[in-house]
Image (cartoon, rainbow, N blue to C red):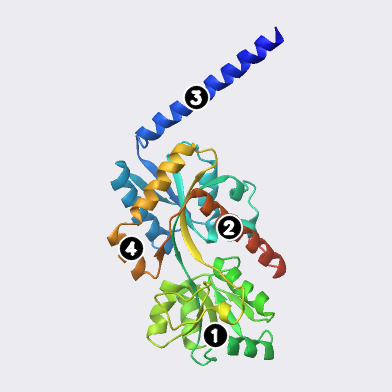
């Protein structure tokens, strides 16, 4: 009797699994059947917003339904991220964000545990951060570090705010070099750039696209990129790793979904990302913005997110960075 019961249970479980698989496969074939909300956890007009709108337009073209950007800025991106984490995992809410995601999660320790409650879909693009200084400072990373070591805490580096990715990337460099600089956070990029360009402050590690125009006019000096290898668009600019071996940070943009989103939908979206990255016009747009298309599997992107998170947790602890309420 017990043997018969166990057999029936196994048969039922197998039947249920097959039924679920078939149902999800059919669901994936017809997905999306309605518009998809694309949460962007930053205000309109920024780098992440621009990428999200380009990707959403290509999703719309490839998948036949509108992908509508919904900007939800605040708290270093965590407001929008929390919305995505708590959304129904049915494929009709996705998140497009940047490498600031694991940095914010490392600092703010959100109750929703976004690192473990989000599903990686696909990385979209990568780009370096750029170490740049006022032209009055030395012309190499090695010389800058030597100057900082000789004047601990006197050089000023600027960021758009405490806990921003720019803040953590810079502290990571200082920790690696074992030197100190004074951090001055700003609430607006305009004032930050004014003070930096006039020499009131001296050092920044920031987005390539925002700093490069000032480098080209000679108002800032590019010392290094943060990627492990020199960037194709700036072959004459060294890497920080050439001075500090092992230092490597890449800025990235990617697509995510709430945890529990059915695997067939994750795979369909992943396939769409990898396909849209072959579009010549999109490639040209990325290149103009100093980015390179990346793509890959959900597993590769998930590994990137978790690796970044572990690094930023360590940086936050070592630099004793406190979240701003």
Label 1 with label 2: CB-CB less than 8 Å: no
Write down the residue under mark 2. 102
Distance (Cα) linking label 4 and label 2: 26 Å
Q: In the picture provided, is 288 more to the left or to the right than 252?
A: left
Q: Pointer 3: residues within 10 angstroms few (<14), some, or many (20+)?
A: few
Write down the residue under mark 1. 202
Q: Position of residue 230 (x, y in %)?
A: 47, 76
Q: Earlier in the sequence, mark 4 or mark 3?
A: 3
Q: Earlier in the sequence, mark 4 or mark 2?
A: 2
Write down the residue under mark 4. 283
Q: Position of residue 58 (x, y in %)?
A: 32, 51
| Residue found 39% across the figure and 76% down from its top | 233
Which SS class for mark 2?
A: helix
Which SS class for mark 4?
A: helix
Viewer-side residue, 124 vs 229: 229
Distance (Cα) linking label 1 and label 2: 27 Å
Label annotation for residue 18: 3
Is residue 91 in view? Answer: no
């Amino acid at each position: 009797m017990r043997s018969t019961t166990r057999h029936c249970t196994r048969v039922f479980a197998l039947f249920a699994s097959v039924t679920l698989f078939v149902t999800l496969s059919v669901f994936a074939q017809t997905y999306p059947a309605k518009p998809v909300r694309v949460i962007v956890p930053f205000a309109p007009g920024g780098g992440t917003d621009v990428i999200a709108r380009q990707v959403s337009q290509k999703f719309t073209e490839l998948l036949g339904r509108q992908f509508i950007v919904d900007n939800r800025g605040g708290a270093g991106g965590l407001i929008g991220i929390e919305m995505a984490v708590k959304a129904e995992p049915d494929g009709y809410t996705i998140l497009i964000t940047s490498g600031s995601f694991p940095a914010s999660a490392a600092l703010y320790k959100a109750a929703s545990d976004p690192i473990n409650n989000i599903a990686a879909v696909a990385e979209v693009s990568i780009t370096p951060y750029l170490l740049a200084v006022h032209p009055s400072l030395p012309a190499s990373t090695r010389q800058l570090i030597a100057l900082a070591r000789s004047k601990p805490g006197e050089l000023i580096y600027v960021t758009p705010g405490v806990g921003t990715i720019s803040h953590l990337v810079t502290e990571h460099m200082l920790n690696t070099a074992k030197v100190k600089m004074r951090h001055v956070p700003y609430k607006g990029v305009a004032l930050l750039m004014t003070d930096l360009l006039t020499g009131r402050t001296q050092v920044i590690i920031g987005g390539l696209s925002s700093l490069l125009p000032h480098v080209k006019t000679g108002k800032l000096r590019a010392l290094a990129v943060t990627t492990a290898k020199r960037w194709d668009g700036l072959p004459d600019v060294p890497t920080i790793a050439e001075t500090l071996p092992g230092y490597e940070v890449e800025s990235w943009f990617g697509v995510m979904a709430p945890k529990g989103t059915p695997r067939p939908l994750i795979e369909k979206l992943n396939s769409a990302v990898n396909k849209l990255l072959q579009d010549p016009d999109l490639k040209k747009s990325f290149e103009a913005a100093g980015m390179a298309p990346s793509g890959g599997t959900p597993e590769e992107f998930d590994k990137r997110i978790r690796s970044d998170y572990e690094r930023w947790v360590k940086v936050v602890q070592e630099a004793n960075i406190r979240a701003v309420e």
